[in-house]
Image (tube, rainbow, N blue to C red):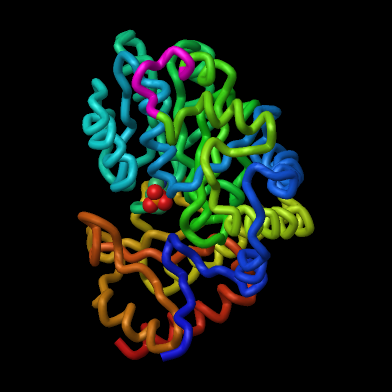
């Protein structure tokens, strides 16, 4: 069988151009060549994330930084805002790291609302919180700016935000939001291969990290800051990934960030329309749907059409495209299709023709 194109919500399809960028000759990570590379992409990353802070590169998947953020920033108790598989897992990870943790659990498909967080933080128990901006398992986007606005009332609480499946697809102004950590893995909306994470920390987060006793070494935020000042990383980074990131950032800025965000809006709209046209409803609460994927309801909620997802997935795969059959406890009762990365109206149009063909054969 030939190449199967990925339309799962991560990893996503990687372009031949990006693969070429990965294959540049190796350089030493303490030499000028690497420093020049990092220094060249630093302002691009800062513009992308809307920050004057240094943006760090972590050779790990997103979870490395997600765990690292807890180890650097939670000394009292963390509030884990939970609305799907990834955000729920963060609570488990906090406990495995030996942290005091409390769950703010809402039903899967619901967003996390600022009022809910406010009520919890008002107890004064917490020094940190974790939030997933775009809960990929349910295709739900929580209202990040509303949540971030709470920071003014709780300046000592560290706001740690995972934007793994939204960063680069929607505007995220780190400094304007006023949050403390923003992170993403590059295999989702960046359309890079898995293995690299990008993150930024506020001055308050760095100050707090400096006082944390058990923050470890590999994900020590203080080390990331110290090294980033010299355009380096604490340990040997995945240099090929960083070449590829540089290539990708050039593409983002050639397209224009606003145009990129608008493109994701249009391609996501095409998938939502496809679902509606075929009698499906979406899984997330209306008004909180993701812009980087659709999580289609297939029996998880009473309304809407129900199909044999495994069969549908196979028919689509026979046409060279992989879609996702649902994640965790909503596997099969939902299915997911991604429009992250390089997808355009043309490629989503081609995908929709294949989806329609497969539906007709069910
Ligand atoms: C994919 C994903 C993760 C997990 O990332 P890894 O790269 O597997 O560590 C975390 N959060 C969200 C929102 C994701 O979509």
Q: Is residue 198 above or below residue 245?
A: above
Residue at x-position 53% and y-position 64% = 339
Picture coordinates of residue 177 (x, y %)? 59, 27
Q: How far from the left and from the top, in percent, is residue 147?
A: 47, 27
Image quadrant holding the C terminus, namely bottom left
Q: Nearer the viewer, residue 166 or 11?
A: 11
Can see residue 286?
Answer: no
Which residue is painted at 34% across and 53% down in the image?
137
**Percent coordinates x, y for residue 148 in the rendering:** 51, 25
Left or right: residue 253 compared with residue 245: right
- In the rendered image, residue 10 lying in the magenta stretch gets the answer no
Q: Position of residue 218 (x, y in %)?
A: 43, 35
* Image quadrant containing the N terminus: bottom left
Picture quadrant where residue 18 is located: bottom right
Which residues, given as a range, are shown in magenta? Answer: 209-216
Q: Quick one: 99 or 315, which is closer to the camera?
A: 99
Quadrant of the image occupied by residue 214: top left
Indicate left or right for 237 with 37 as reference.
left
């Amino acid at each position: 069988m030939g190449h199967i194109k990925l339309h799962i919500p991560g990893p996503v399809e990687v372009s031949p151009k990006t693969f070429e960028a990965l294959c540049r000759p190796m350089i030493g990570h303490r030499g000028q060549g690497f420093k020049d590379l990092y220094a060249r992409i630093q302002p691009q990353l800062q513009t992308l994330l809307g920050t004057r802070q240094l943006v760090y590169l972590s050779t790990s998947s997103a979870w490395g930084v997600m765990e690292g953020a807890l180890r650097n920033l939670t000394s009292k108790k963390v509030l884990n805002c939970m609305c799907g598989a990834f955000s729920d897992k963060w609570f488990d990870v906090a406990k495995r790291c030996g942290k005091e943790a409390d769950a703010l659990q809402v039903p899967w498909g619901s967003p996390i609302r600022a009022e809910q967080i406010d009520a919890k933080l008002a107890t004064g128990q917490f020094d940190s919180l974790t939030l997933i901006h775009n809960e990929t398992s349910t295709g739900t986007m929580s209202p990040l700016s509303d949540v971030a606005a709470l920071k003014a009332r709780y300046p000592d609480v560290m706001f740690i935000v995972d934007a793994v499946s939204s960063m680069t697809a929607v505007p995220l102004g780190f400094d304007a939001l006023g949050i403390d950590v923003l992170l993403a893995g590059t295999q989702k909306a960046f359309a890079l291969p898995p293995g690299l994470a990008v993150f930024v920390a506020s001055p308050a987060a760095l100050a707090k990290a400096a006082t944390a006793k058990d923050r470890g070494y590999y994900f020590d935020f203080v080390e990331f800051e110290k090294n980033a000042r010299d355009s380096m990383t604490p340990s040997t980074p995945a240099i090929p990934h960083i070449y590829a990131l540089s290539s990708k950032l050039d593409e983002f800025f050639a397209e224009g960030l606003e145009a990129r965000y608008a493109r994701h809006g249009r391609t996501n709209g095409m998938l939502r329309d496809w679902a509606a046209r075929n009698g499906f409803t979406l899984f997330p609460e209306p008004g909180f749907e993701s812009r980087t994927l659709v999580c289609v309801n297939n029996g998880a909620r009473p309304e809407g059409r129900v199909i044999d997802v495994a069969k549908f997935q196979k028919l689509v795969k026979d046409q060279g495209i992989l879609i996702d059959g649902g994640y965790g406890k909503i596997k099969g009762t939902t299915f997911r299709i991604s429009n992250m990365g390089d997808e355009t109206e043309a490629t989503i149009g081609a995908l929709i023709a294949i989806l329609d063909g497969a539906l007709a054969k069910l």
